[in-house]
Amino acid sequence: MFLSPRLGARPRRLRACTVDLEALIRASLLIAAAVAALIFLRPARAAGHPPAWFIEGALCLHSGWHYTHHRVKHRRPEYVLWRRGYWRTWKTSGNGEGRWDAANPPYGGGLQMDGGFQSSYGSEFLARFGPAGRWPVAAQILVAYRGWLRQGWGAWPTTSRTCGLR
């Protein structure tokens, strides 16, 4: 119910507000900067692990088979990478890049990375394990993702076309 002021009553006086306007503006700017830092300055994804769609593409480059991270009933995943399973679905017309432990100088690993690619995008694995053919599968895929972020699928021109990635 709407209450109207009494007739003849004196209007109330508002108290003077003693807020420091500059301090309020500074505090709100600091809060806005903190929120922006939380939202926009997150660490790059390559520091963690590649997204599922990239891993599916890399597995296709490796073997010539398409993979999915969606569960396939009554089958175990062929790969479990970063706690996610990957199931083989169908074969492409190509053969893929080769075995994960392949050592075909100057290329190595299941994604056939040359020495320059290995040292540019996976120097810590190169120092720890040696050539890419000795790296774990997850390390090879992570290094391929780092290279893909800079070069795209062009580092694997033929097999990326065969897998439908370009």
Image: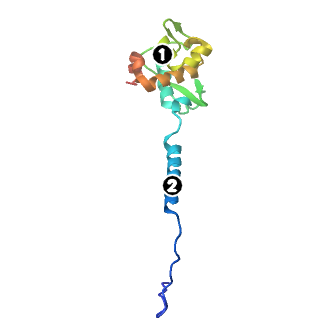
Relative image position of residue 129 (x, y in whole percent): 61, 14
Which quadrant is home to the C terminus? top left
Of the two numbered discs 1 and 2 in the rendering, the one whose residue sits closer to the viewer: 2
- Which one is nearer the viewer's eye here, 83 or 91? 83
Neighbor class of circle 1 (other Cα within 10 Å; few <14, some 14-19, many 20+) is some
Residue at the image point whose x is 52% and y is 58% from the top:
23
Tally of numbered tags: 2
Neighbor class of circle 2 (other Cα within 10 Å; few <14, some 14-19, many 20+) is few
Relative image position of residue 50 (x, y in whole percent): 52, 29
Residue at the image point whose x is 50% and y is 40% from the top:
41
Q: CA distance from mark 1 to mark 2?
A: 48 Å
- Which one is nearer the viewer's eye here, 134 or 66? 134
Q: Which residue is under mark 2?
A: 26
In the rendered image of this protein, does residue 137 appear above or below residue 9? above
Pick whichever of labels 1 and 2 is earlier in the sequence.
2
Q: Looking at the image, which residue sits at the far bottom?
A: 8
- Which one is nearer the viewer's eye here, 99 or 148? 148
Q: Looking at the image, which residue sits at the far top?
A: 105
Q: Residue 153 sits in which quadrant?
A: top left
Helix, strand or loop status at disc 1: helix
Cβ–Cβ under 8 Å for marks 1 and 2 = no
Q: Looking at the picture, which amino acid does disc 2 mark?
A: Arg
Q: Looking at the picture, which amino acid does disc 1 mark?
A: Phe
Helix, strand or loop status at disc 2: helix
Relative image position of residue 43 (x, y in whole percent): 53, 35
- Which one is nearer the viewer's eye here, 2 or 14? 14
Residue at the image point whose x is 48% and y is 30% from the top:
53
Is any atom of residue 113 visible in this view?
A: no
Q: Which mark is residue 117?
A: 1
